[in-house]
Amino acid sequence: MKLLLDTNALLWALLEKHRLSRRAIEVIEDEANDLLVSVVSVWEIEIKRAKGRLHVPMEIELSLTEQRFKPLSVNLRHAQAVESLPRLHRDPFDRMLICQAQLDGLTLVTSDRMMRRYPIATMPA
């Protein structure tokens, strides 16, 4: 299974694993699954850190590597798909994650019920 963690699920996996569902923990820990983290999530984390709205006591890139998360870049087809995405969700970071999951056939691990309304595979975080 190819999993894309949304920003909250990523932070929980790195810092507060107890907040994840039992199923999310199982699939994240299963080495047969590919774990992807969008550069959009890292961008969101760093913006919030810079504004003092989020405390993340670690160097993100090192932590991702240690936890076997692979980076997922944003490309032109992801960016162009945002325009045609239904306007159910207003957060631009989340909209990009939805496009990436949709176009790349990924299961999005999320606690955001609004993201589950899109035609993508999701798993509760």
Image: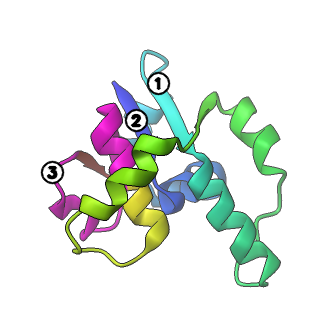
Q: Of all residues shown, which one is farthest toward the bottom? A: 52
* Residue 2 horizontal/vertical position (percent): 38, 28
Whether residue 32 appears in this view of the structure is yes
Contact (Cβ within 8 Å) of mark 3 with mark 2: no
Name the residue located 40 percent from the left edge and 35 percent from the top edge. 3
Residue topped by disc 3: 119
Q: Secondary structure at mark 1?
A: strand
Q: Nearer the viewer, residue 22 or 63?
A: 63
Give the CA separation, mark 1 to mark 2. 6 Å
Tag 2 or tag 3, which sits nearer the N-term?
2
Q: Which span is picked out in magenta?
A: 98-120
Label 3 neighbourhood size at 10 Å, few (<14), some (14-19), many (20+)?
Answer: few
Quarter of the image for residue 47 reads bottom right
User: In which quadrant is the C terminus drawn?
Assistant: bottom left
Residue topped by disc 2: 3
Q: Secondary structure at mark 2?
A: strand
**Total marks placed:** 3
